[in-house]
Image (tube, helix red, strand yellow):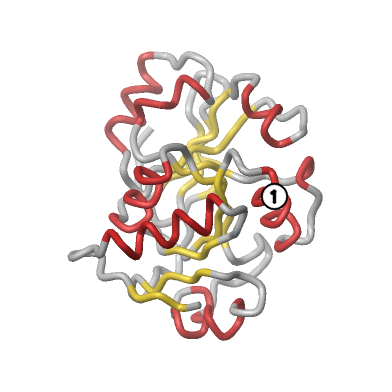
Amino acid sequence: MLVEINPTNIDIRLIQQAVDVLKSGGVIIFPTDTVYSMGCDLYNKKGLNELAKLKNIKLNKANFSIICSDLSHLSEYVKQLDRSVFKLLKQSLPGPFTFILNATNEIPRLFDTNRKEIGIRIPNNAIVLEIVKLLGNPIATTSLHNDEDTIADYFADPYMIYERFDDDVPFIIDGGYGQLEASTIVDCTNGSPEIIRQGIGKIIL
């Protein structure tokens, strides 16, 4: 199903449909402020396994990030932040960044793994932020493309995404044409932030 949502005039009924799919253990495809992404309810094991299956990996090997609606719930998922790191997050988010942070014990429990860190995203995109707010907890997320893929038009054009993923994903959101560049990844696990992938987000460390 391809559902068009206007990011400047959001129909909350359509957001509720997306949340219903997430709560039932389904995966959705949605726009962000970078490339289109796929995701599931962080607290739905069926959804997490389905997301891993779509990426052809086992859940305990997956390197999913989580999308939060704001910084207020971070303490549930990441260990206490240095003041300088928190200031960097506050200055940069919402925005096209993935911050790698030291995870609390909640993350290994959710992902059936011994992961010690987690990627945190708060995209500057009203559609996905409304979904996370209405869901009431973060979304586990991964990009449509694999790291070795060139990000081509079919990762940015909602109709091409629909043609490619309609058989696999029950709910695909058309929120307009996406970007062709991924988020900038900043590793903050060692106290001193380090850019490990330069993407669309510009940051001065």
Q: Position of residue 72 (x, y in %)?
A: 35, 26
How many numbered circles are shown?
1
Residue sitting at 65 percent across and 60 percent down?
147
Q: Position of residue 59 (x, y in %)?
A: 76, 46
Asked whether, in this view, residue 193 is left or right of residue 163, the answer is: left
Residue on which the image places disc 1: 46
Residue 143 position by quadrant: bottom right
Q: Position of residue 173 (x, y in %)?
A: 42, 70
Asked whether, in this view, residue 198 is left or right of residue 107, the answer is: left
Asked whether, in this view, residue 70 is left or right of residue 158, the answer is: left
> Disc 1 on helix, strand or loop?
helix
Q: Nearer the viewer, residue 43 or 163?
A: 43
Residue sitting at 34 percent across and 29 percent down?
88
Residue sitting at 28 percent across and 55 percent down?
126
As shown in the figure, which amino acid type bears the numbered disc 1? Lys
For residue 101, above or below residue 15: above
Q: Quadrant of the C terminus?
A: top left
Residue sitting at 37 percent across and 49 percent down?
123
Packing grade of label 1 (10 A; few <14, some 14-19, many >=20) is some
Q: Position of residue 179 (x, y in %)?
A: 40, 68
Q: Nearer the viewer, residue 186 or 34?
A: 34
